[in-house]
Amino acid sequence: MALQTINPTTTASWAKLREHFELIQNTTMQEMFQQDPDRAEKFGIKWNDFLLDYSKNRISTKTMSLLLDLASELDLKNAIKDYFAGEPINKTENRAVLHTALRAQKTDVINVDGTNIVPAVYEVKDKIKAFSHQVISGNQKGYTHKAFTDVVNIGIGGSDLGPAMAVEALGYYRNHLNIHFVSNIDGDHVHEIIKKIHPETTLFVLVSKTFTTQETLTNAQTIKKWFLQTAKQEDVAKHFVAVSTNIPKTTEFGIHPDNVFPMWDWVGGRFSLWSAVGLSVSLAVGYKNFEDLLRGANEMDTHFKTTDLDQNMPVILALLSIWYNNFFGAQTEAIIPYTQYLQKLAPYLQQGIMESNGKSVGRDCKTVNYQTGTIIWGEPGTNAQHAFFQLLHQGTKLIPSDFIGFKTPLYGNTEHHDKLMANFFAQTQALMQGKAAEQVQAECQQQGMTAEEIKFITAFKTFQGNKPTNALLIEKLTPKTLGALLALYEHKIFVQGIIWNIFSFDQWGVELGKQLANTILEEITTQKVSAQDSSTTALLKYYLNK
Ligand code: F6P
């Protein structure tokens, strides 16, 4: 079935939400908490190792019921069915969207064009397993019969951000292999990596779904050239493997077909971590942990697919985001994980969320007349507190934030962990409660300040509060909980795309810049600058005048 093409602002629920917004927008969360002692219980979901507390949001039961009506009116349930069933919901590319099949159970049957794709997924998983084992155990050797010590993942976008984030996130579970990532076409990036590795003991994983991406191919060629300064052409096959859908291109590069890990066009780049794109994750933490990552994601898939909408974590997070984006006019959302291991989560989610939902044409082919994709940013706490939290607390913008914390520290250092989590709880509390002028004045008096001093300083030390946060408290950072967390955000993306009536799984917006870069590169290499807009022409002339 094709997805509906309804402009959400034309629905009855949207109109009711508008009316409701007018009534509720000036009610503060402080008042809501005072009025309802059961608020945390009402607006909380416990699922497996996750607790989602969304009570510190500017919502009432009425808000949630209207948002859920909106989801129903826009046929979310059937859209979810279509998504998991492999319907071609990526209509502009005429493709199914089946990253969920990559973490399906072996016995599941998921058909694409009449063929069950699950056996092929498991074939590749077996290949990842065997290869990871060979490399980690040292049985797989380089051209001078030495075991590999280093792995370089060469890819960009979804072929870099997911593996780089997951390798960092699962640092606690890492083995002896050093994993490096080269993504930027900036030659200084690749040269910094080259400084750290040795050709005899380094394995190169070329990750590119299309195998046509300029950055990845340029970096791969540079690395191959460097490798061939000491090794021979036939050694390339021992040191270079690829993850791609484009076998002819990988062969042309010199990679033996046995060393190509296939992927499929029904996996979007930014959702491809679960495929062989995650090979460097499997190499870094071992296949068993990689499989646990997939298992966690699969459990979240089941939760999303089978749970009623009002208890469904991705649905609730998506609806809250829509509430702020489309009714309060919030522009951005912050992601604040309280673990250093998740320092690359925000950049990873930036691609997932912004490349998916940064669209302004609806599924009805018309320009939308409402806001879509949110701007995503963030940093781990407590570092973030000392960087940009001032603006969250006292700035003029409304920034709904997700706080992600864990109950158990990995190295068992409870002293640090209690301090870390005390900050997590305190920040969400401060953002919600704020600090009243009376309290500021009382504190100032206690400190012996004069009346005049107090009069001056009060406004600056007052916090309005009423800033929304979701608190996601997870048992422990494991491959499995990480998998579930990432899948949670993937499904949140899906729900928002459905409601916003956009196609979330294409990315035409990245094409124009690529096209123009090719034309401009030609002008740079030939040193012939054509008459373009005066700014670009002047910049090019200045650049060429070295
Ligand atoms: O930036 C656009 C994009 O197509 C992303 O969606 C993708 O993750 C990235 O480029 C890399 O593409 P590929 O894996 O084909 O090299």
Image: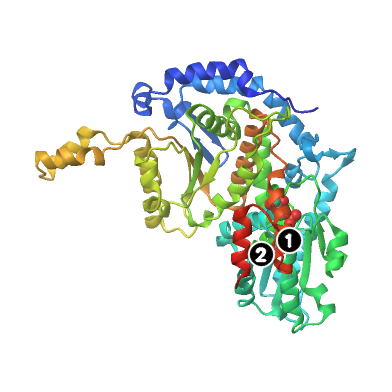
Q: Can residue 530 be seen in this view?
A: yes
Mark 2 CB in 8 Å range of ligand 1? no
Image position, residue 122 (x, y; %): 81, 51
Residue 381 falls left or right of residue 81: left
Q: Which of 127 and 415 is in front in this view?
A: 127
Work out whether 420 lies above or below 367.
below
Q: Can residue 175 be seen in this view?
A: no
| Res. 202 mark | none
Residue 501 falls left or right of residue 429: right
Disc on the earlier residue, 1 or 2: 2
Badge 1 crowding class, 10 Å Cα cut-off, few under 14, some 14 to 19, many 20 or more, is few
The residue wearing badge 2 is 185
Seen at 64% across and 41% down, the residue is 490
Looking at this rendering, what residue extends furthest in the right direction? 114
Seen at 67% across and 29% down, the residue is 501
Circles 1 and 2 in contact, beta carbons < 8 Å: yes
Quadrant where the image shows the C terminus: bottom right
Image position, residue 539 (x, y; %): 59, 60
Image quadrant of residue 257?
bottom right
Q: How many labels does the image show?
A: 2
Image position, residue 229 (x, y; %): 74, 83
Alpha-carbon span between mark 1 and mark 2: 8 Å
Quadrant where the image shows the N terminus: top right
Residue 501 falls left or right of residue 63: right
Disc 2 residue type (three-letter): Ile
Badge 2 crowding class, 10 Å Cα cut-off, few under 14, some 14 to 19, many 20 or more, is some
The residue wearing badge 1 is 214
Seen at 43% across and 30% down, the residue is 40
Disc 1 residue type (three-letter): Gln
SS type, badge 2: loop
Work out whether 176 lies above or below 508.
below
